[in-house]
Image: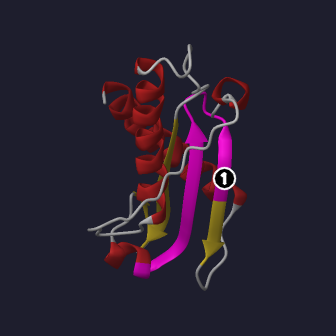
């Protein structure tokens, strides 16, 4: 998501602490870190440290799963604790996958269900990326 050649010999350190959450903090941290990176990119350009944006593509993460037989996006703590399938998805604005972590919690699931959950995650990530673009 970052053009390292444009960044040069610099380091951007992003540390995320989720202060309040109703569900998983991992996806919130990943999405929040990208927003922080956008702020850092803006600052680098304003200061003339870099000419063009170092960001090649947007990025966001969501959790999806199945709880009580229902497909859910952005599971709450209670939904996550009862989920039979739990998945985290990190995807770019170009709909390329960066990470997929999925597990059946005490049960298996079909490949068709995996595809449905990925579709749900993609839709959620698309909404987050629209919000990021407005930030």
Q: Position of residue 92 (x, y in %)?
A: 58, 36
Identify the main secondary structure in magenta: strand
Q: Quadrant of residue 57?
A: top right
Q: Position of residue 83 (x, y in %)?
A: 47, 76
Farthest top residue in view: 51
Residue depicted at x 65% and y 56%: 100
The foreground one among 101 and 40 is 40
Q: Quadrant of residue 113?
A: bottom right
Q: Is residue 70 above or below residue 112?
A: below
Tell whether 89 sits left or right of 23: right
Farthest bottom residue in view: 106
Number of marks in the rendered image = 1
Residue depicted at x 56% and y 14%: 52
- For disc 1, the marked residue is 99
Q: Is residue 91 above or below residue 86?
A: above
Label 1: state its secondary structure.
strand
Q: Position of residue 93 (x, y in %)?
A: 55, 30
The foreground one among 127 and 9 is 9
The foreground one among 45 and 35 is 45
Q: Position of residue 91 (x, y in %)?
A: 59, 42
Q: Is residue 91 above or below residue 107?
A: above
What residue span does the magenta drawing correspond to?
81-100
Quadrant into which the N terminus falls = top right
Label 1 Cα neighbours within 10 Å, binned few <14 / some 14-19 / many ≥20: few
Quadrant into which the C terminus falls = top left
Say if the magenta span includes residue 59: no
């Amino acid at each position: 998501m970052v053009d390292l050649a444009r960044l040069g010999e610099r380091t951007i350190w992003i540390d995320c602490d989720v202060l309040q959450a109703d569900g998983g903090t991992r996806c919130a941290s990943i999405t929040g870190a990208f927003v922080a990176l956008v702020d850092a990119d803006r600052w680098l350009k304003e200061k003339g440290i870099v000419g063009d944006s170092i960001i090649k593509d947007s990025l966001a993460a969501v959790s999806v799963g199945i709880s009580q037989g229902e497909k859910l996006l952005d599971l709450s703590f209670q939904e996550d604790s009862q989920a039979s399938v739990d998945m985290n998805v990190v995807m770019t604005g170009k709909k390329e996958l960066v990470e997929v972590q999925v597990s059946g919690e005490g049960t298996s699931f079909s490949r068709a269900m995996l595809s449905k959950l990925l579709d749900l995650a993609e839709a959620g990530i698309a909404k987050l990326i629209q919000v990021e673009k407005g930030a």
